[in-house]
Amino acid sequence: MTAARAVLLTRLTASIEAKRALLSDPDRIAAFEAIADVVVATYKSGGRLYIAGNGGSAADAQHLAAEFVSKLARDRAPLAAEALTVDTSILTAIGNDYGFDAVFSRQIEGKMTAKDIFLGITTSGNSRNILEALRTCRKLNIRTIIFSGGNGGLAAEEADHCLLAPSEITSTIQEIHIIFAHALCECVENAMFPLRST
């Protein structure tokens, strides 16, 4: 077996095992259901979704915001969502003036209200700027969700809702997070724009 084949098979096996573990875990499924319900309720009450993460999770935040604002799989009206990872002037100004730990919390203070909901994506659960974001949300009575992995780290204690990928491997956690994100968007689409039978 070549080294490349061994890596691919290892990664595929880890991904399949994590998905099987998720399928057979009623607590994680229930946590997802609760998150879907609270996001739907947020939109029905006129709120917005704000998302943040670092590195690959920053890309996932942008990916999810795009699915909400544009569409996932069918035409419908846009849903208000914003990734707090995209404005380089804001990120560098806050980072320079207040430090990198404040790049999300400062935006939350300026943009979000108690009608909105925050989704933090952190594979470790210990990203300091995500933890600061969660603490700021708590002060402002803003509901919070975390997508993480492993035991959820410190973020699992700070968030109102926590959904954990059943893995300790960063790349596998990120794969599961995309499944969470797509499924969440689909649930919200279905609730907000139900298909009409003819």
Image: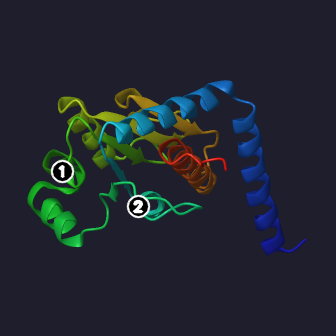
Q: Nearer the viewer, residue 15 or 75?
A: 75
Residue at the extreme front of the image, as rendered: 198
The spot of residue 75 in percent (x, y) is 53, 63
Q: CA distance from mark 2 to mark 1?
A: 17 Å
Image-based side of 20 in relation to 103, left or right: right
The spot of residue 14 in percent (x, y) is 74, 51
Question: Residue at the spot x=40%, y=61% of the render?
Answer: 69
Q: Amino acid at mark 1?
A: Lys
Question: Residue at the spot x=53%, y=33% of the render?
Answer: 151
Choose mark 2 or mark 1, whichever is in front.
2
The secondary element bearing badge 2 is classed as helix
Question: Residue at the spot x=64%, y=53% of the render?
Answer: 172
The spot of residue 36 in percent (x, y) is 50, 37
Residue designated by label 2:
69
Badge 2 density bin: few <14, some 14–19, many ≥20, Cα 10 Å: some
Image-based side of 31 in relation to 106, left or right: right
Badge 1 density bin: few <14, some 14–19, many ≥20, Cα 10 Å: few
Q: Quadrant of residue 194?
A: top right
Q: Nearer the viewer, residue 123 or 163?
A: 163
Q: Amino acid at mark 2?
A: Val
Q: Is residue 56 above or below residue 121?
A: below
Q: Nearer the viewer, residue 65 or 156?
A: 65
Count every numbered label the image shows and give the total: 2
Residue designated by label 1:
111
Q: Is residue 162 above or below residue 171?
A: above
Q: Is residue 97 above or below residue 117?
A: below
The secondary element bearing badge 1 is classed as helix
Mark on residue 15?
none
